[in-house]
Amino acid sequence: MSETDVTPDTGSTATTTTAGESDERVREAWTEYRAAGQTKLSVDDLDVWYGDDHALKDVSMDIPSESVTALIGPSGCGKSTFLRCLNRMNDRIKAARVEGSVEFDGTEVYDPNANLVELRKRIGMVFQSPNPFPKSIRENISYGPRKHGDINKGLLARLFGRDDTEAEAELVERALKQAALWDEVNDRLDDNALGLSGGQQQRLCIARCLAVDPDVILMDEPASALDPIATSKIEDLVEELAEEYTVVIVTHNMQQAARISDQTAVFLTGGELIEYDDTEKIFENPESQRVEDYITGKFG
Amino acid sequence: MSEAYTHETAIISEGSNSYDRVLDGAIAISILAFATALLALIEIVPLDATGGELGSFLLSLFAAVSGAVGLTAVASWANVVPVTSQRVRGIAVSLVVTAGLLTAIAYAAAVNLATIFGLVLVVEALVIIGAGISSRLAIVDTEPDSSAGLLAGGAFAAVGLVVGGALGGSVVGFDSVLWLLTALVAGGGLGMVTILPREDIGSTLPVGLVVGTLGVAIATAAIGVGWQWNPETLSGGFTGGAVIPLFVLFGTLLSAWSAAKCRAGFGAQGREYGAFFVINLNALLMVSVMIAIVLFVAVKGAAYAIHGFSAGALTILVVLTPALALATEIARSPSGTGDWHPGAATLFRLTPLAATGAVAAVLTTVLVTGQALRYPFTYLIQVNRESEPLETAITITPEPAVGAVMLTLVGALMFVVLFRRYGSLRNVGATFPRAETVRQAVPAAVATVVLLLGAFVVVGSSPAGVPLGTTLGTAVVGAGGLAAVGLTALPVAGVLTRDGPLADRLQASAPLFTVGIFGALGLSIAVLFLQPTAGVAPSVLGVDIVPAAAVLAGLLCAVAAGAASYGARTTDESLQTRLLGEETVLGLTGAAGFVTLLGAHVLATGARFSVLGTAITTEGTFSWPMLMQAYIPLGAEPGGIMPAVVGTVWLVIGASLFALPLGVGAAVFLTEYAEQGRFTAVVEIATNALWSTPSIVFGLFGAAFLIPRLGGNESLLAGMLVLGFMLLPLVLITSRESILAVPDEYRDASAALGVSRWETIRSVVLPAAMPGVITGGILGIGRIAGETAPLILVLGSTLNATEPVKVLQGFRFVAQPPFIVNDQLLAASASLPTQVWAVIAAGVSGSPQMGWATAAILLSVVLTFYGLGITARTYFRRKLNYE
């Protein structure tokens, strides 16, 4: 396997040339991979460019529902780009151009007539650094439902007798309990969310995402800015969430991927998906030498 | 108290030696002389003052210093703001000692202030040189660097050049080249003395030389009060009166720097401490200049501005209500006193409440005894270029009447404040008999009254000669008023008819509170509007039904609030306490609402209403001639400036209404929607250019472009637009900056929740940017409120605007575009800045005092706008941070 003696990371073009016969064989293998369970998201030939930079190359994979799918790979390999494609967050970057198809429950996400609001309600996202709004804990949770008109509050609602204060209280309690935060904050729901610790803030962001009742939760390195204890809490939470939701999580931490995910996709430099399989298989007996090198720390 | 002082002085002497104490004294005397020189510069105290005059001035300075230091010491002792720094303590005590010393000298010796300044500088020089030498000889323990540094050397060389040149020039004259030589020698020498020796000499000896030279020159009267120097090359000259304070300011700044360096033992510490003093005294200088301007204007204008002020005690009592609410708020939740001594914190919390109570008691005494409070004073006006004294007084009258405007405003304010406090009483308490009937009947009754109101508006109060208004209208108004009273009686009745402990009864009556008070308020509002439309004023035994009903309803609400408040004290259950608290607030809200309705009724009908000997009138008992009287150009004294005040307020409102939405909207578009590129860059350059455009150019644009298109006359509208154009760029720039400063993460988070861009801007970005936007608005409004040049061109002559513009009454509907016209907006108006300009510069009033008074009022209007803005900014910031 001489072609795996890759040159050091010299950018996107260098690695495409090294992709030889063996990679083709590996590719055959994971393209055929079908994870157990119903397909939630089906990605087909997805390419992303940032200006002239080809950030994601021809990625196809099926993500099964009610499971944890981990995306791993070195920095700049396109895994976050891939994640942001799933709920069209890349639309917010002006230079980004997306080609290919993403189907969500059989509906094309990149349909020009697709309803972005509905899409992002059903595919929620948690970011790398905790980003609660500078509002109270309660308002952070109820922000989404309020903006979608599911909860009415305020003077006008009160005058028209449609005040949903109790519905809001229930929603806040449910979301915070799901995010395992309720016991820590239930006595200070009206305090500023920015006064919470980093780990609590991140769980609040997860609760905020759960409050709009999504099907899929995308997590972009949710624990990378947190200490080990907060990280383990987030990991427990992810495993719990997978019973009800489809979780796609980007992580740098290989142990984390091995611990919590059901299937793992490995991206390597150049925006290519190298291998996608059951997590056990990826970590114990990967098809590709490059993936094995990466996982054992010889590369990347 | 004396024990505390002993303790304080003990701490000072404990850790510091005589070297430290002498230097603390030098710093203190620098500060004192610096402040005094500032006062001398703006001629608050003359430089040639001697004996008793100087003594009394220094005595008041001594008293002020002692008071400040004493109060700080007490606060420190009470642990409010503990002062532990030895240096601060040393300087504080030295301030008192030196101020006392100077006072004693002034009384004992026949010297003038200039001489004292000179002596102070000489003493400073000696102390500093002495400190430097004792450090060099290692008598004291210091850590000096090897040199004071090139920067200090250069600075002292420059000082030496100037001082040497001036000295040489005045001795040998500027015709000879010798003066240049002395300048060079002095400059070079001073630079060398600074750079070459070790730091302790390098930063003391040159200071001592310079300060000492200045001091000797001033003390020996070589540069005395009467000293003058008129160089031929300059058109002006220098006089001792101006030069001596400047020399003292410079000398004390230098010696404070050097003494501070010595005190902290040179080295890095010394530089830090020295810089601290130079920067702080500089800041003091800036602040003093600002305060001096404000004081100067206020002192010159105050007497004229408040002549003939009078107010009814009852009116002041009404105005005091919001102050009472604020004081209660402070007493309930004191902010920022967490680490204070508990006693001091309690004092701080209760003082506003006690002060409000004291004022209220005095006013009540006035009301009860019928004795007016009168403070007579005299002020000078100029009539035909002659000063003439005019007797006037500030009066607080015992008249038992209150103005309807004041009552409505205060009532509405209190209603809003209390209603915001009121949370919810939903699903609390027991149902009451026929609850559903009442719940349906109240909206039905309100709807009936509103329908009738609509009918009267459409067909008139007596359609086809049928006196519907006087029959049906009277019946409905009467019934509505009585029903409102009945509804407000519900809470009290509910409490009285139930059994059990008071708190339980109150809790069970919660639905009666909400239905009764909100229902009565709704019904009363409808009736209030119906009455003038139907043209009736039903009365029983000579008392108008509607206002009487409002008074009764308000009293019943207050009784309910009182019962709830008392009930809350009788229970220990926290939930019940909270519920009864809500009931109290609701009762008070109702009372405030009915007071507002009462005022609005008198305003709407114009009929005076009196109850229990207290009258509510449309005239009111508040009179402030300067503010409330029309302007009398060139007429008999004293006139008012109401037109100018009203004009300025409308200008600011109009300009803000025009510029704030446009500016913020443009900022949102540029930051959130527009592609960052050439277009936004061009807009940015254009905005900055607009911001730096001279105001007179805006005025010319208004005069040449706007006025021909707005009716051809100078007008209020043109003024609003021109000021709006001036305000626009600053609002745009600051809004843009603060919107850009909102982290992108918030936008990402909101987008990921499926929230649209506009919703995100509205509920996340703008609230986070609001403090910055508000700050921009304040700065801009502060600038345009005092803008004169463009208004002279577009607003019209003050002489013609002797009556205030009536913008609100000026709106008329017409059947053709633009459908709404307002002649008042197109008429010329006065404004405070143009009035000041006209009175002082163009002399269109009988008294120049009026100009100063107008300037003082303009200043307070601008400061009020700043105050409002800062309050709003603090509010938004607190809301953002949940403080």
Image (cartoon, coloured by chain):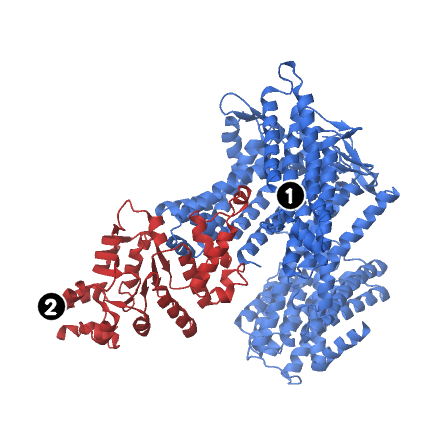
Chain colours: A red, B blue
Q: As displayed, is residue B753 above or below residue B862? A: below
Of residues A267 and B699, the one nearer the viewer is A267
| Residue B443 picture location, percent across and down | 59, 36
Of residues B837 and B576, the one nearer the viewer is B576
Of residues B76 and A272, the one nearer the viewer is A272
Residue type, label 1? Pro
Query: Horizontal placement of B364 versus B199: left or right?
Result: right
Mark 1 touching mark 2, by CB under 8 A?
no
> The N terminus of chain B lies in which quarter of the figure?
bottom right
Distance (Cα) linking label 1 and label 2: 87 Å
| Residue B659 picture location, percent across and down | 51, 40
> The C terminus of chain B lies in which quarter of the figure?
bottom right
Q: As displayed, is residue B297 above or below residue B700? A: below
Instruction: Mark 1 vs mark 2: give the one in front.
Output: 1
Residue type, label 2? Glu
Q: Residue furthest left?
A: A21
Residue sitting at x 30%, y 64%: A67
| Residue B420 picture location, percent across and down | 61, 48
Residue sitting at x 55%, y 68%: B154
Q: Quadrant of residue B695?
A: top right
Q: Which residue is mark 1?
A: B433
Q: Chain of mark 1?
A: B
Secondary element at tag 1:
loop
Res A141 seen here: yes
Q: Quadrant of residue B537?
A: top right
Of residues B772 and A220, the one nearer the viewer is A220
Q: Which residue is mark 2?
A: A21
Secondary element at tag 2:
helix
| Residue B440 picture location, percent across and down | 59, 37
Res B839 seen here: no
